Every structure is written in C-alpha cells, then in structure tokens.
Image (tube, rainbow, N blue to C red):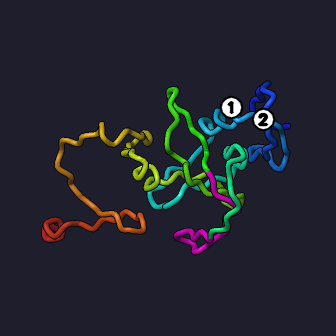
Amino acid sequence: MCAEPMDTCQAKTKYTCGACGPTEYEATPTVALRNVAITRWCVDSGANRDICNERHLFNGNMTEKHIRIGEAGAGHSFTSEAEGAIPLRVRGKMLPLFERAIYADSVSENIMSVPEAVDRGYTVVFTKTGVEFHEAEKVRVPAEPILKGARTPATDYSMSPSRAHRLAL
C-alpha cells in the first residue's frame, strides 16, 4: 500500500504511485497537488523539457504522446508515453511551471528543466548549498559577470571564455 497521504474528497481518481511501484490507489486532485511539492526533482540546465516518472502527479491531465528523448553523455535515449501539465501551488499561488511536462516511466528520476522555468518567467540561481527560483522581474545582479554565455534556439546554454580571458591565459 502506498504511504502517500489520502484525501477524503468524493471526487477520487485512480493513480499509479511511482513511489511504491505498480500499486494503484485512489486520490483526489488535492493529493496530487500536494505530492508534487514533496517530490524530488533534479534541476537540470541541459534539459529542454520537464520529465516526470510519476503518473499520479499529472492529476489525470495528460495526453498520449510519444516523443523520442535523447540523453547526453552515454548516448542512451527513450520514448515518452504522454505529455501534460503537473499542477504546482506555492504560497497559495499556482505556478506556471511543469505546464508541458513529459511523462516517461523509463526515466530514473524526475527532471526539472531550467530553460522551461526561464521561459515561464523565473531566474534560477545555483549556489554551494542549493538552487533557488526567483521571479525574473525581481532579480537584479549588480556585479559585472566574470564569464558570460548564450542560449541557443534549441534552449541549450553554453559558454566560452571571452577573447580577453583567452589572451590572459
């Protein structure tokens, strides 16, 4: 039996819980909304889409869609089963994140795409202790950048040392 909290609402939907295997359970949309906030997401600047392996987080809001996904490094790839929106509420506000998430049960962990978050109006800051999401219009960086990169149309971020830095090496 799944250890996820159950809700007592009458509008229940069947979900497959990714946390405890193929066990199906009934939960309300409220439970799915609460679970996305406690689910672990790998925040990835190289991922151009959000990818989730937990069907119940989509709250039944998914459409069958087979997309070939390539993984960098080892050259592995897989195919998605569906695409949809995963609701996420923070501080009483619905956030526009995970609006076009890909469902793929073959991915080993949930992946949150930095480019998707940036496109939805957020600035993502990585530090020694973690990662933070801020509303982009409220972020100001007073210092001149030491290195600066670019974003390609394919949503990849890349950086090469500037001419000045190469001359100094």
- The Cα atoms of the two marked residues, 1 and 2, are separated by 8 Å
**Position in image of residue 28 (x %, y %):** 75, 33
Residue at left offset 13%, top offset 66% = 164
Amino acid under disc 1: Thr
User: Badge 2 is on which residue?
Assistant: 27
User: Badge 1 is on which residue?
Assistant: 30
Residue 73 inside the magenta-drawn segment: yes
Residue 122 inside the magenta-drawn segment: no
- Badge number at residue 59: none
**Position in image of residue 49 (x %, y %):** 53, 59
- Mark 1 lies on a secondary structure that is helix
Dividing the image into 4 quarters, which one contains the C terminus? bottom left
Residue at left offset 49%, top offset 54% = 113
**Position in image of residue 3 (x %, y %):** 78, 34
Foreground residue, 168 or 127?
127
**Residues in magenta?**
68-84
